Amino acid sequence: MQKVKLHIKKNDMVIVTKGREKGKSGKVLRVLPDKGMAIVEKLNFVKRHAKPSQQIRQGGIIEKEAPLTLANLMLLCSRCNKPVRTGRKQLEDGKSVRICKKCGDILDK
Ligand SMILES: [Zn+2]
């Protein structure tokens, strides 16, 4: 099995490039690698009508972040202050890190 190389990781700052939340940015809360999606803080909220159940004591409307497709997310480079493409670079100790293709800054800190 080939491991999927993800360009986005938990706690990254990303910007949405397509869809309803286009142009908005937020922090990645969770990556769902097998689905190719990520949950971004305060983005793509969906309202759900919840019926009282074992899990939820009270019924009503709950708001929850729905996952966004990774392909529609781009990493924000803190130095460029804009969405950038990422590359990879091997450090002297053999560790592979993500870099900003624009300014060359290391994104994995
Ligand atoms: Zn940059």
Image (spheres, rainbow, N blue to C red):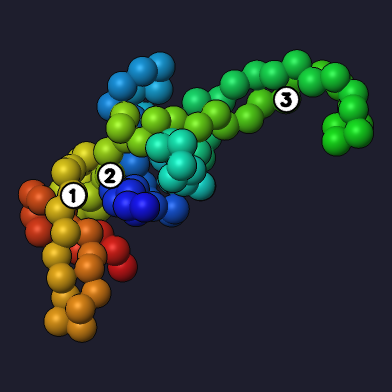
Residue 78's place in the image compared with 48, above or below, is below
| Label 3 vs label 1, nearer the camera | 1
User: Residue 14's spot in the image, x, y percent?
Assistant: 34, 41
Q: Is residue 15 visible?
A: no
Whether ligand 1 has any atom under 8 Å from the Cβ at mark 3 is answered as no
Residue 96's place in the image compared with 61, above or below, is below
Considering depth in this image, is 107 or 2 the residue closer to the camera? Answer: 2
Tell me where residue 70 sits by quadrant. Answer: top left
Q: Are marks 3 and 1 in contact (CB under 8 Å)?
A: no
The residue depicted at 44 percent of the width and 30 percent of the height is: 68
Q: Which residue is mark 3?
A: 62
Q: CA distance from mark 3 to mark 2?
A: 29 Å
Please name the amino acid that badge 3 sits on.
Ile
Q: Is residue 4 left or right of residue 35?
A: left
User: Residue 48's spot in the image, x, y percent?
Assistant: 70, 19
Residue 47's place in the image compared with 35, above or below, is above
Q: Which residue is mark 2?
A: 75
The residue depicted at 15 percent of the width and 70 percent of the height is: 90
Q: CA distance from mark 3 to mark 1?
A: 35 Å
Tell me where residue 20 sits by quadrant. Answer: top left
Whether ligand 1 has any atom under 8 Å from the Cβ at mark 1 is answered as no
| Label 1 vs label 2, nearer the camera | 1
Circle nearer the N terminus (1, 2):
2
Q: Residues within 10 Å of mark 2 (few under 14, many from 20)?
A: many
Q: Which residue is mark 1?
A: 86
User: Residue 60's spot in the image, x, y percent?
Assistant: 82, 19
Circle nearer the N terminus (3, 1):
3
Q: CA distance from mark 1 to mark 2?
A: 8 Å
Please name the amino acid that badge 2 sits on.
Leu
Q: Secondary structure at mark 3?
A: strand
Quarter of the C terminus within the rendering: bottom left
Q: Secondary structure at mark 2?
A: strand
